[in-house]
Amino acid sequence: MQNEDIEKELSKLKYHVRLLGETIDWDTKPITALVISMDWDDKQLSRAHDIFEEYDKKLSAKQTINWVEFEHKLRDEFDIGY
C-alpha cells in the first residue's frame, strides 16, 4: 500500500470515529465524548485531568479561583476558546 492510500484510509477511519463519537451520550459518557470530539490522546486527557484536579482542590479548600487563569490554561494547553 502506498503512502497516498494509507493517508486516505487513515482519513476515512478518523471520519468514521468522529461519526461514532457523535452517537455517544454526553450525559452518560462525558469524558469519552469529550476526548473524541477534541481529538485528544491519552496524554492530553491526563493533562486535562491535572488541570481540573488543580482547580477542584482549590474549590474544595474554598480558595478564591482566578477563572481567567483557568481559561488561559485550557486555551494554552488545548487551544480551547469560546
Image: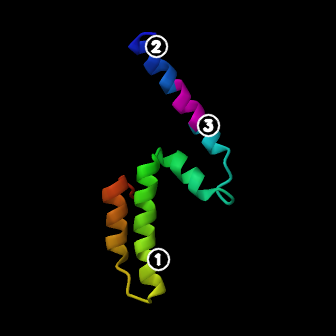
Look at the image and give the residue range highlighted in magenta.
12-17
- Judging by the rendered image, the residue that carries numbered circle 1 is 56
User: x, y percentage for residue 66?
Assistant: 34, 79
Amino acid type for the residue under numbered disc 3: Leu
Amino acid type for the residue under numbered disc 1: Asp
For marks 2 and 3, give the CA distance.
21 Å
User: x, y percentage for residue 32?
Assistant: 59, 51
- Judging by the rendered image, the residue that carries numbered circle 2 is 5
For marks 2 and 1, give the CA distance.
46 Å
- Judging by the rendered image, the residue that carries numbered circle 3 is 19
Name the quadrant of the C terminus. bottom left
Q: Crowdedness of circle 1 by 10 Å Cα count: few (<14), some, many (20+)?
A: few
Answer whether residue 72 is magenta in the image: no
Q: Are marks 1 and 3 in contact (CB under 8 Å)?
A: no
User: x, y percentage for residue 49?
Assistant: 46, 63
Count the numbered circles shown. Answer: 3
Q: Secondary structure at mark 3?
A: helix
Label disc, if present, on residue 27 of the rendered structure: none
User: x, y percentage for residue 75?
Assistant: 34, 59
* Residue located at (40% from left, 59% from top): 47
Would you identify the image quadrant in which residue 48 lies? bottom left
Q: Crowdedness of circle 2 by 10 Å Cα count: few (<14), some, many (20+)?
A: few
Residue 29 placement, left or right of 63: right
Residue 82 in sight from this viewpoint: no
Which numbered disc, 2 or 3, marks the residue that appears first in the sequence? 2
* Residue located at (44% from left, 88% from top): 61
